[in-house]
Amino acid sequence: MANHFFLAHLVAGEIGAGSGPEYTPAYAHRGRYTPLWVSIAALPDLDMRPAALGHALAAGLLDTDRPPLALDDEP
């Protein structure tokens, strides 16, 4: 299964103030969507899936000057 991750930059707005469908009761069965800022250095210590993504971000392996990074799914 392919997972897609996108590089984004903050432009403006307030984190968590979205009004997309993931914030509606119809999506409650899919879990909570609670965005939060964390430091890049802390990513390997979080329960990220795939964990390799947190390690790649913290190591600076993802940026616009590099080719796409392929990450394997974890069981």
Image: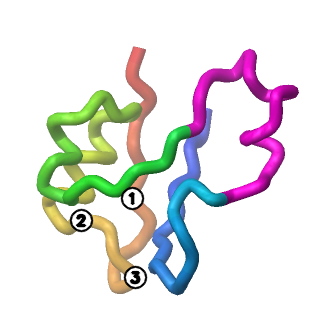
Verify CB contact (< 8 Å) between mark 2 and mark 1: yes
First in sequence: mark 2 or mark 1? 2
Estimate the spatial distance between the alpha carbons at disc 3 and disc 1, rounded to whole Å.
11 Å
Q: Secondary structure at mark 1?
A: loop
Q: Position of residue 49 (x, y in %)?
A: 40, 32
Q: Which mark is residue 7?
A: none
Q: Secondary structure at mark 2?
A: loop
Q: Amino acid at mark 3?
A: Thr
Q: Which mark is residue 69?
A: 1
Residue 57, by quadrant, is bottom left
Residue identifier under label 3: 64
Vertical placement of residue 52 versus 17, above or below: above
Q: Amino acid at mark 1?
A: Leu
Q: Secondary structure at mark 3?
A: loop
Residue 67, by quadrant, is bottom left
The boundaries of the magenta stretch are 18-33
Vertical placement of residue 44 versus 63, above or below: above
- Which of discs 3 and 1 lies nearer the camera? The answer is 3
Quadrant of the image containing the N terminus = top right
Residues packed near mark 2 inside 10 Å, few (<14), some (14 to 19) or many (20 plus): some
Q: Amino acid at mark 2?
A: Leu
